[in-house]
Amino acid sequence: MKSYIATGVLLMLLAGGAFAGKGTEVSNINCHGTWIRSETDKLELLSACGKPTFSEVVSGANYSKLEGLLYQLNGNKYVIYLNRGKVVKMEWLR
C-alpha cells in the first residue's frame, strides 16, 4: 500500500513536467551523516541514502534524462532530481 501512495505522490509532482513539483526547494539534505547537495554524484547519493522509495524518469533520452527519486528520511519526504547522474534539484514535500 505504501508503494502505491509513494508512486501516486511522485507522479502527481512530476505530472506537470520537469521541475514542476509542489515541494519546497532545499539546498542540502543530510542522509545518515552525509550531506547531499547539488552536483552530488548518483553513486554517492545511493551509498549515503540507500534505495529510494520510488524513482521515475521524468523526461529526456538516455544521456540527458531527468530522473526523480522519492526518499523518506527522518520522517520527511524529499524528491531528488538527477540529470546525467548528478543531483540538480531537491524538494521537501509537506
Image (tube, grey):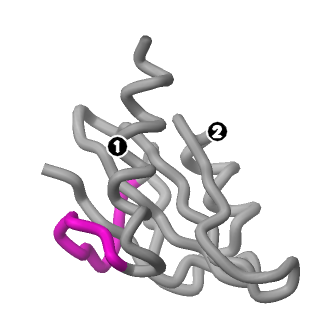
From the top left corner, tell me how far across and down residue 54 is, in percent: 56, 40
Q: At 21% from the left edge and 66% from the top edge, which residue is drawn?
A: 22
**Mark 1 — residue?**
9
Would you say 60 lies left or right of 94 here?
right
**Residue closer to the observer: 93 or 17:** 17
Position of 10 relative to 85 (above/below) = above
From the top left corner, tell me how far across and down residue 60 is, in percent: 72, 82
Q: At 76% from the left edge and 88% from the top edge, which residue is drawn?
A: 64
The stretch in magenta equals 20-30
Q: Quadrant of residue 1?
A: top left
Secondary structure under the numbered disc 2 in the rendered image: loop
Q: Residue furthest top?
A: 1
Q: Residue furthest front?
A: 16
Q: At 34% from the left edge and 52% from the top edge, which residue is drawn?
A: 12
> How far is mark 1 from mark 2, CA to CA?
17 Å
Q: Going from the N terminus, do you reach mark 1 or mark 2 first?
A: 1
**Residue closer to the observer: 37 or 7:** 7
* Residue 23 colored in magenta in the image: yes
Name the amino acid, label 2: Lys
Label 1 Cα neighbours within 10 Å, binned few <14 / some 14-19 / many ≥20: some
**Mark nearer the viewer, 1 or 2:** 1
Position of 37 relative to 10 (above/below) = below
Would you say 20 lies left or right of 42 here?
left
Secondary structure under the numbered disc 1 in the rendered image: helix
From the top left corner, tell me how far across and down residue 44 is, in percent: 68, 62
* Residue 1 colored in magenta in the image: no
**Residue closer to the observer: 27 or 10:** 10
Task: Specify the label residue 54 is tagged with.
Answer: none
Label 2 Cα neighbours within 10 Å, binned few <14 / some 14-19 / many ≥20: few
**Mark 2 — residue?**
51
Q: Quadrant of residue 15?
A: bottom left
- Total numbered labels: 2
